[in-house]
C-alpha cells in the first residue's frame, strides 16, 4: 500500500531534532511521496535542502494569504524563476484567502490572483488555503476562469460544508482532507468527504498542525496521514487499500508525481 501526504511543513523547527526518525515512521506507514507546501519564498532554501536530502519530497512555491502584506512585484518574478529552475516544484502555493482574522481582504485577493496567473502561465496546479472565505473564493475563481482560463488545483485542509464543496468540485478542483476529518464534531467535513468523487479526493496532514485522532494534541507528522486515510475509508465504506490507491493516483495526476518502483 502506498500513501501520499499532499501537504506538509517539515522544514519547521519542531522537526529539526528527529527528522530521520520521523522519516522512518512515514516510510513504515506506507508514505512514499510528500508535497511540501511553502508559506513564503524565503522558505525555499530550507525546503530545497530537505528535497536534496529526501528524494520522496516535491514542493510548491508561493505566498500564504496571511503574509499577503509581504507581496511585491519582484516576488512574482522570484516565484516564476524558482518554479522554472527546479523540476521538483510541482505547484504554486500555498496561496488563497484567509478572512478568519484578516482585515486586508482586497490585498489578499490581489495577491492570490497574481499567483493564479503564475500557475496559469506555468501550467502548474495551485494549492489553495481557504478559511472563512468560501463565497469570495468561489466568486474570484469564477471571474478568473472567465477572463483568463481555468487553473487546476486543490482545496487543501478542506473544512467547508457540502454545499461549498460542490462549488469547488464544479470548478474542477480536487478536495484534500486533513486530520480534522477524524474529529468527532466534524460532521460537516465528514459529509463533504463522503460526497467527493473518488477521482478528486486527496489526503494530507498539514503537519505539524492538526494531528488526527488518536494523536490529537501532539505534533503532527506525515506518518499520521494513514489515520486520515483510515477515517475516510470508514466513512466511504471502502477498504483502506482502495482509498490509498485512489488518493495516490489522484496526487500523482494532479502534481505529476512518479511513484517509486
Image (cartoon, helix red, strand yellow):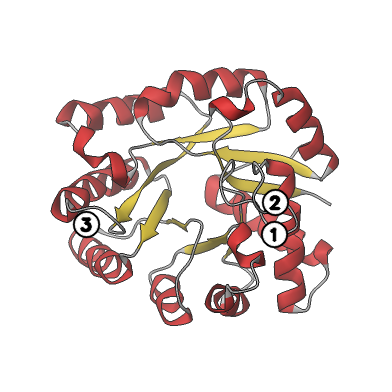
Kindly identify the residue that appears in the image at 59 percent across and 22 percent down. Answer: 50
Residue 169: horizontal and vertical position, in percent?
45, 72
Q: Tell me the residue that label 1 is attached to.
A: 228
Q: Are marks 2 and 1 in contact (CB under 8 Å)?
A: yes
Location of the C terminus (image quadrant): top right
Disc 1 element: helix
Residue 198 is drawn in which quadrant?
bottom right
* Relative vertical location of residue 69 with respect to residue 143 in this rendering, above or below: above
Q: CA distance from mark 1 to mark 3?
A: 35 Å
Residue 153: horizontal and vertical position, in percent?
44, 55
Q: Is residue 205 left or right of residue 130?
A: right
Residue 241 is drawn in which quadrant?
bottom right
Residue 66 is drawn in which quadrant?
top left
Residue 215: horizontal and vertical position, in percent?
72, 51
Q: Tell me the residue that label 3 is attached to.
A: 148
Labels 2 and 3: the sequence-earlier one: 3
Q: Nearer the viewer, residue 25 or 255?
A: 25
Is any atom of residue 258 visible in this view?
no
1 vs 3, front mark = 1
Per the rendering, the mark at residue 112 is none
Q: Tell me the residue that label 2 is attached to.
A: 225
Amino acid at each position: 500500500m502506498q500513501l501520499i501526504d499532499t501537504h506538509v511543513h517539515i522544514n519547521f523547527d519542531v522537526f529539526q531534532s528527529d527528522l530521520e526518525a520521523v522519516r522512518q515512521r512515514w516510510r513504515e506507514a506506507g508514505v512514499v511521496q510528500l508535497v511540501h507546501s511553502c508559506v513564503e519564498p524565503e522558505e525555499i532554501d530550507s525546503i530545497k535542502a530537505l528535497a536534496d536530502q529526501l528524494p520522496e519530497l516535491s514542493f510548491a512555491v508561493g505566498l500564504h494569504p496571511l503574509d499577503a502584506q509581504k507581496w511585491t512585484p519582484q516576488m512574482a518574478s522570484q516565484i516564476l524563476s524558482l518554479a522554472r529552475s527546479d523540476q521538483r516544484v510541482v505547484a504554486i502555493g500555498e496561496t488563497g484567502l484567509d478572512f478568519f482574522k484578516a482585515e486586508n481582504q482586497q490585498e489578499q485577493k490581489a495577491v492570490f490572483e497574481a499567483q493564479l496567473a503564475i500557475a496559469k502561465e506555468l501550467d502548474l496546479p495551485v494549492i489553495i488555503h481557504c478559511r472563512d472565505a468560501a463565497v469570495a473564493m468561489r466568486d474570484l475563481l469564477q471571474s478568473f476562469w472567465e477572463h483568463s482560463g481555468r487553473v487546476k488545483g486543490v482545496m487543501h485542509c478542506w473544512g467547508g460544508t457540502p454545499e461549498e464543496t460542490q462549488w469547488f468540485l464544479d470548478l474542477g478542483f480536487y478536495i484534500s482532507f486533513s486530520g480534522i476529518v477524524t474529529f468527532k464534531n466534524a460532521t460537516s467535513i465528514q459529509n463533504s468527504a463522503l460526497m467527493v468523487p473518488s477521482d478528486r479526493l486527496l489526503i494530507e496532514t498539514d503537519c505539524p498542525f492538526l494531528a488526527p485522532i488518536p494523536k490529537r494534541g501532539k505534533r503532527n507528522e506525515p506518518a499520521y496521514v494513514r489515520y486520515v486515510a483510515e477515517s475516510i475509508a470508514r466513512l466511504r465504506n471502502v477498504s483502506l487499500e482502495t482509498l490509498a490507491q485512489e488518493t495516490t493516483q489522484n496526487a500523482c495526476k494532479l502534481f505529476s508525481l512518479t511513484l517509486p518502483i
